[in-house]
Amino acid sequence: MHEHPHHHSIRIGTMVNATKGNAAERIAQIAGMGFESFEPFFWQTTNGQDVAELGKRCVEAIGDRDITISTIGMFGNPLEETDLDQQTLQGWLDCIDNAHHFGATCVAGFTGRIRNKPLTDSLPRYKQVWSELAKRAADKGIRIAFENCAMNGNWASGDWNIAHNPDAWELIFNETPDDNIGLEWEPCHQMVYLIDPLPQIRKWAHKIFHVHGKDATIRWDVIREHGIFGKHPFVFMRTPGFGDSNWTDIISELRLAGWSGSIDIEGWHDPVYRDALEMTGQVHALNHLKQARGGSFVADPS
Protein backbone atom coordinates (compact mmCIF):
# COMPACT_ATOMS: atom_id res chain seq x y z
CA MET A 1 0.00 0.00 0.00
CA HIS A 2 1.23 3.47 -0.81
CA GLU A 3 2.36 5.39 2.27
CA HIS A 4 2.28 9.16 2.46
CA PRO A 5 5.59 10.92 3.23
CA HIS A 6 4.84 11.03 6.95
CA HIS A 7 3.89 7.32 6.91
CA HIS A 8 0.15 7.88 7.32
CA SER A 9 -1.74 5.90 4.71
CA ILE A 10 -4.84 7.52 6.25
CA ARG A 11 -4.79 11.22 7.02
CA ILE A 12 -7.22 13.05 9.31
CA GLY A 13 -8.28 16.56 8.30
CA THR A 14 -11.26 18.87 8.00
CA MET A 15 -13.47 20.69 5.52
CA VAL A 16 -13.10 24.41 4.78
CA ASN A 17 -15.88 26.48 3.19
CA ALA A 18 -14.56 28.08 0.01
CA THR A 19 -17.80 29.68 -1.19
CA LYS A 20 -17.16 33.10 0.31
CA GLY A 21 -13.62 33.45 -0.96
CA ASN A 22 -11.72 33.15 2.33
CA ALA A 23 -10.72 29.48 2.21
CA ALA A 24 -6.99 30.18 2.08
CA GLU A 25 -7.24 32.53 5.04
CA ARG A 26 -9.18 29.92 7.00
CA ILE A 27 -6.58 27.27 6.22
CA ALA A 28 -3.85 29.62 7.45
CA GLN A 29 -5.81 30.15 10.69
CA ILE A 30 -6.20 26.47 11.59
CA ALA A 31 -3.30 24.73 9.82
CA GLY A 32 -1.33 24.61 13.05
CA MET A 33 -4.02 22.72 14.99
CA GLY A 34 -2.89 19.28 13.89
CA PHE A 35 -5.00 18.70 10.77
CA GLU A 36 -3.24 16.59 8.15
CA SER A 37 -5.52 17.42 5.22
CA PHE A 38 -8.13 19.91 4.09
CA GLU A 39 -11.16 19.71 1.79
CA PRO A 40 -12.08 23.16 0.46
CA PHE A 41 -15.69 23.04 -0.75
CA PHE A 42 -18.23 25.23 -2.52
CA TRP A 43 -21.95 25.34 -1.77
CA GLN A 44 -23.92 25.51 -5.05
CA THR A 45 -21.70 28.20 -6.61
CA THR A 46 -18.08 29.27 -6.81
CA ASN A 47 -19.35 32.87 -6.71
CA GLY A 48 -17.31 33.68 -9.79
CA GLN A 49 -14.00 32.97 -8.09
CA ASP A 50 -10.88 32.15 -10.06
CA VAL A 51 -10.65 28.54 -8.89
CA ALA A 52 -7.09 28.11 -10.12
CA GLU A 53 -5.96 31.16 -8.19
CA LEU A 54 -7.82 29.98 -5.09
CA GLY A 55 -6.07 26.63 -5.32
CA LYS A 56 -2.68 28.28 -5.46
CA ARG A 57 -3.52 30.46 -2.44
CA CYS A 58 -4.69 27.42 -0.44
CA VAL A 59 -1.42 25.63 -1.19
CA GLU A 60 0.51 28.74 -0.19
CA ALA A 61 -1.45 28.93 3.08
CA ILE A 62 -0.34 25.37 3.90
CA GLY A 63 3.25 26.32 3.20
CA ASP A 64 5.83 23.70 4.15
CA ARG A 65 3.54 21.88 6.59
CA ASP A 66 2.91 18.20 5.95
CA ILE A 67 -0.72 18.78 4.95
CA THR A 68 -2.44 17.70 1.76
CA ILE A 69 -5.59 18.58 -0.18
CA SER A 70 -6.73 15.35 -1.81
CA THR A 71 -10.32 16.38 -2.52
CA ILE A 72 -12.28 19.55 -3.23
CA GLY A 73 -16.07 19.75 -3.01
CA MET A 74 -18.89 21.19 -5.14
CA PHE A 75 -22.28 20.66 -3.50
CA GLY A 76 -25.51 21.50 -5.32
CA ASN A 77 -27.89 20.08 -7.93
CA PRO A 78 -26.24 19.99 -11.37
CA LEU A 79 -29.07 17.98 -12.98
CA GLU A 80 -31.75 20.69 -13.16
CA GLU A 81 -31.71 24.03 -14.91
CA THR A 82 -32.43 26.93 -12.57
CA ASP A 83 -29.77 29.62 -12.58
CA LEU A 84 -28.24 28.24 -9.38
CA ASP A 85 -28.28 24.68 -10.74
CA GLN A 86 -26.41 25.86 -13.84
CA GLN A 87 -23.90 27.60 -11.59
CA THR A 88 -23.42 24.29 -9.79
CA LEU A 89 -22.78 22.48 -13.07
CA GLN A 90 -20.32 25.17 -14.11
CA GLY A 91 -18.71 24.85 -10.69
CA TRP A 92 -18.15 21.14 -11.32
CA LEU A 93 -16.44 21.96 -14.62
CA ASP A 94 -14.25 24.57 -12.94
CA CYS A 95 -13.35 22.23 -10.07
CA ILE A 96 -12.49 19.34 -12.38
CA ASP A 97 -10.36 21.59 -14.58
CA ASN A 98 -8.54 23.24 -11.66
CA ALA A 99 -8.31 20.56 -8.97
CA HIS A 100 -4.62 20.13 -9.73
CA HIS A 101 -3.93 23.68 -8.54
CA PHE A 102 -4.97 22.48 -5.06
CA GLY A 103 -2.91 19.31 -5.44
CA ALA A 104 -6.24 17.44 -5.42
CA THR A 105 -7.05 14.32 -7.42
CA CYS A 106 -10.75 14.09 -6.52
CA VAL A 107 -13.83 16.34 -6.75
CA ALA A 108 -16.77 15.46 -4.53
CA GLY A 109 -20.41 16.49 -4.18
CA PHE A 110 -24.00 15.48 -4.82
CA THR A 111 -25.24 13.78 -7.98
CA GLY A 112 -28.16 16.17 -8.26
CA ARG A 113 -31.73 15.03 -8.71
CA ILE A 114 -34.86 15.71 -10.75
CA ARG A 115 -36.79 17.45 -8.00
CA ASN A 116 -39.78 15.89 -6.27
CA LYS A 117 -39.73 12.78 -8.45
CA PRO A 118 -38.95 9.15 -7.58
CA LEU A 119 -35.23 8.46 -7.48
CA THR A 120 -35.25 6.35 -10.64
CA ASP A 121 -36.69 9.25 -12.67
CA SER A 122 -33.32 10.99 -12.30
CA LEU A 123 -31.28 8.22 -13.91
CA PRO A 124 -31.51 9.31 -17.59
CA ARG A 125 -30.43 12.87 -16.77
CA TYR A 126 -27.83 11.55 -14.33
CA LYS A 127 -26.30 9.40 -17.07
CA GLN A 128 -26.32 12.28 -19.56
CA VAL A 129 -24.53 14.73 -17.25
CA TRP A 130 -22.17 12.45 -15.38
CA SER A 131 -20.96 10.39 -18.34
CA GLU A 132 -19.59 13.61 -19.82
CA LEU A 133 -18.16 14.85 -16.53
CA ALA A 134 -16.55 11.48 -15.86
CA LYS A 135 -14.76 11.56 -19.21
CA ARG A 136 -13.64 15.16 -18.67
CA ALA A 137 -12.32 14.21 -15.23
CA ALA A 138 -10.62 11.02 -16.43
CA ASP A 139 -8.76 12.97 -19.10
CA LYS A 140 -7.29 15.10 -16.29
CA GLY A 141 -6.57 12.24 -13.87
CA ILE A 142 -9.41 13.30 -11.57
CA ARG A 143 -11.87 11.07 -9.73
CA ILE A 144 -15.47 12.02 -8.92
CA ALA A 145 -16.94 11.09 -5.54
CA PHE A 146 -20.62 11.35 -4.58
CA GLU A 147 -21.44 12.08 -0.97
CA ASN A 148 -23.99 9.63 0.47
CA CYS A 149 -26.20 12.36 1.96
CA ALA A 150 -29.95 12.28 1.28
CA MET A 151 -30.48 15.97 2.14
CA ASN A 152 -33.84 14.92 3.61
CA GLY A 153 -34.82 13.14 0.42
CA ASN A 154 -35.80 9.50 0.06
CA TRP A 155 -36.56 7.02 -2.69
CA ALA A 156 -39.90 8.62 -3.51
CA SER A 157 -38.90 12.28 -3.54
CA GLY A 158 -36.08 14.74 -2.98
CA ASP A 159 -34.21 17.60 -4.58
CA TRP A 160 -30.41 17.19 -4.19
CA ASN A 161 -28.92 13.75 -4.44
CA ILE A 162 -29.68 10.17 -5.48
CA ALA A 163 -26.44 8.59 -4.17
CA HIS A 164 -27.70 8.19 -0.59
CA ASN A 165 -28.68 4.53 -0.55
CA PRO A 166 -26.76 1.34 -1.45
CA ASP A 167 -29.56 0.25 -3.78
CA ALA A 168 -29.15 3.57 -5.59
CA TRP A 169 -25.39 3.03 -5.83
CA GLU A 170 -26.07 -0.16 -7.77
CA LEU A 171 -28.21 1.85 -10.19
CA ILE A 172 -25.90 4.82 -10.67
CA PHE A 173 -22.74 2.76 -11.09
CA ASN A 174 -24.61 0.71 -13.70
CA GLU A 175 -25.46 3.94 -15.57
CA THR A 176 -21.89 5.23 -15.25
CA PRO A 177 -19.53 2.22 -14.98
CA ASP A 178 -16.54 4.57 -15.19
CA ASP A 179 -13.65 3.61 -12.92
CA ASN A 180 -13.26 7.22 -11.77
CA ILE A 181 -16.80 7.57 -10.36
CA GLY A 182 -17.23 6.55 -6.74
CA LEU A 183 -18.31 7.67 -3.28
CA GLU A 184 -17.48 10.28 -0.69
CA TRP A 185 -18.64 8.02 2.11
CA GLU A 186 -19.48 8.64 5.74
CA PRO A 187 -21.22 6.47 8.33
CA CYS A 188 -23.55 9.24 9.55
CA HIS A 189 -25.71 9.30 6.44
CA GLN A 190 -26.35 5.57 6.66
CA MET A 191 -27.07 5.63 10.39
CA VAL A 192 -29.80 8.26 10.00
CA TYR A 193 -31.66 5.62 7.96
CA LEU A 194 -30.80 2.86 10.45
CA ILE A 195 -28.40 1.19 8.00
CA ASP A 196 -25.34 -0.47 9.54
CA PRO A 197 -22.37 1.31 7.92
CA LEU A 198 -19.67 -1.28 8.67
CA PRO A 199 -20.69 -4.02 6.20
CA GLN A 200 -20.81 -1.34 3.49
CA ILE A 201 -17.06 -0.86 3.75
CA ARG A 202 -16.42 -4.53 3.02
CA LYS A 203 -18.64 -4.39 -0.06
CA TRP A 204 -17.98 -0.89 -1.37
CA ALA A 205 -14.41 0.01 -0.35
CA HIS A 206 -13.27 -0.14 -3.99
CA LYS A 207 -15.70 2.70 -4.72
CA ILE A 208 -14.91 4.81 -1.65
CA PHE A 209 -12.62 7.59 -2.89
CA HIS A 210 -12.91 9.97 0.09
CA VAL A 211 -14.34 9.76 3.60
CA HIS A 212 -16.14 12.41 5.61
CA GLY A 213 -15.66 12.44 9.35
CA LYS A 214 -19.20 12.78 10.62
CA ASP A 215 -21.14 10.70 13.09
CA ALA A 216 -24.68 10.27 14.43
CA THR A 217 -26.42 9.52 17.70
CA ILE A 218 -29.49 7.28 17.41
CA ARG A 219 -32.05 7.67 20.19
CA TRP A 220 -33.34 4.12 20.40
CA ASP A 221 -35.53 5.01 23.37
CA VAL A 222 -37.35 7.57 21.20
CA ILE A 223 -37.73 5.02 18.39
CA ARG A 224 -39.19 2.43 20.75
CA GLU A 225 -41.69 4.90 22.23
CA HIS A 226 -42.50 7.25 19.33
CA GLY A 227 -41.18 5.58 16.16
CA ILE A 228 -39.20 7.30 13.41
CA PHE A 229 -42.04 9.41 11.96
CA GLY A 230 -43.20 11.03 15.19
CA LYS A 231 -42.72 14.56 16.51
CA HIS A 232 -39.58 13.69 18.48
CA PRO A 233 -36.23 13.54 16.62
CA PHE A 234 -34.89 9.99 16.73
CA VAL A 235 -31.40 10.74 15.39
CA PHE A 236 -29.05 13.68 15.12
CA MET A 237 -25.71 14.26 13.45
CA ARG A 238 -22.55 14.45 15.55
CA THR A 239 -18.91 15.34 15.27
CA PRO A 240 -16.78 12.15 15.52
CA GLY A 241 -16.05 11.21 19.11
CA PHE A 242 -19.49 12.28 20.32
CA GLY A 243 -21.70 9.83 18.40
CA ASP A 244 -22.39 6.11 18.16
CA SER A 245 -19.85 5.08 15.51
CA ASN A 246 -16.91 2.91 16.43
CA TRP A 247 -14.27 4.68 14.39
CA THR A 248 -11.64 2.15 15.41
CA ASP A 249 -13.69 -0.52 13.63
CA ILE A 250 -14.42 1.77 10.67
CA ILE A 251 -10.75 2.58 10.09
CA SER A 252 -9.76 -1.04 10.67
CA GLU A 253 -12.23 -2.15 8.00
CA LEU A 254 -10.89 0.52 5.63
CA ARG A 255 -7.33 -0.65 6.24
CA LEU A 256 -8.32 -4.32 5.79
CA ALA A 257 -9.78 -3.34 2.41
CA GLY A 258 -6.48 -1.72 1.45
CA TRP A 259 -7.96 1.78 1.55
CA SER A 260 -5.80 4.86 1.85
CA GLY A 261 -6.70 8.52 1.69
CA SER A 262 -8.09 11.32 3.82
CA ILE A 263 -10.88 11.40 6.36
CA ASP A 264 -11.95 15.04 6.47
CA ILE A 265 -14.16 16.12 9.35
CA GLU A 266 -17.48 17.69 8.37
CA GLY A 267 -18.39 20.05 11.17
CA TRP A 268 -21.30 22.48 11.74
CA HIS A 269 -23.87 19.76 12.43
CA ASP A 270 -23.37 18.78 16.05
CA PRO A 271 -26.18 20.20 18.24
CA VAL A 272 -23.80 20.59 21.18
CA TYR A 273 -20.31 21.27 19.80
CA ARG A 274 -21.12 24.15 17.49
CA ASP A 275 -20.81 27.94 17.36
CA ALA A 276 -18.39 28.88 20.16
CA LEU A 277 -17.61 25.15 20.67
CA GLU A 278 -17.16 24.35 16.95
CA MET A 279 -13.36 24.09 16.94
CA THR A 280 -13.36 22.46 20.37
CA GLY A 281 -15.46 19.71 18.82
CA GLN A 282 -13.42 19.52 15.64
CA VAL A 283 -10.06 19.25 17.40
CA HIS A 284 -11.56 16.61 19.72
CA ALA A 285 -12.71 14.74 16.60
CA LEU A 286 -9.26 15.13 15.05
CA ASN A 287 -7.59 13.56 18.07
CA HIS A 288 -10.31 10.90 18.40
CA LEU A 289 -9.86 9.83 14.77
CA LYS A 290 -6.08 9.83 15.09
CA GLN A 291 -6.38 7.46 18.04
CA ALA A 292 -8.88 5.30 16.13
CA ARG A 293 -6.29 5.14 13.36
CA GLY A 294 -3.84 3.65 15.87
CA GLY A 295 -2.22 6.88 17.02
CA SER A 296 1.04 8.12 15.55
CA PHE A 297 2.96 5.94 13.14
CA VAL A 298 5.78 4.03 14.84
CA ALA A 299 8.40 2.51 12.58
CA ASP A 300 9.43 -1.03 13.38
CA PRO A 301 13.19 -0.89 14.04
CA SER A 302 13.79 -4.44 12.80
Image: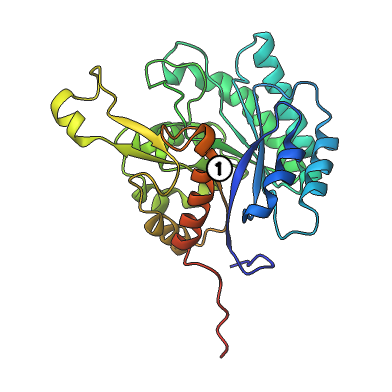
Q: Is residue 97 visible?
A: yes
**Residue 169 in the image: x percent, y percent?**
45, 35
Say which quadrant the N terminus sits in. Answer: bottom right
User: Taking 143 as reference, is 116 above or below it?
Assistant: above
- Relative vertical location of residue 29 with respect to residue 220 in this rendering, above or below: below
Q: Quadrant of residue 36?
A: bottom right
Callout 1: helix, strand or loop?
helix
Q: Left or right: where does residue 217 sit relative to residue 53?
A: left
| Residue at point 54%, 69% (across, down) | 296
* Left or right of 66 on screen, residue 128: left
Residue 231 falls in which quadrant of the image? top left
**Total number of numbered discs in the rendering:** 1
Q: Nearer the viewer, residue 206 or 273?
A: 273
Where does the C terminus fall, quadrant-wise? Answer: bottom right
Q: Residue furthest front?
A: 276
- From this view, report whether residue 147 is shown above or below residue 212: above
Please rate how many residues cluster around mark 1, counting C-alpha atoms within 10 Å: few if below 14, some from 14 to 19, many from 20.
some
Residue found 55% across the figure and 77% down from its top: 298
Q: Position of residue 291 (x, y in %)?
A: 46, 62
In this rendering, position of residue 101 left or right of residue 129: right
Q: Residue at x 56, y 72 (%)?
A: 297
Residue at 57% from the left image edge and 24% from the top image edge: 126
Task: Please name the residue that numbered disc 1 is placed on.
Answer: 279
Q: Residue 151: percent from the left, percent from the top?
A: 46, 24
Label 1 is placed on what type of residue? Answer: Met
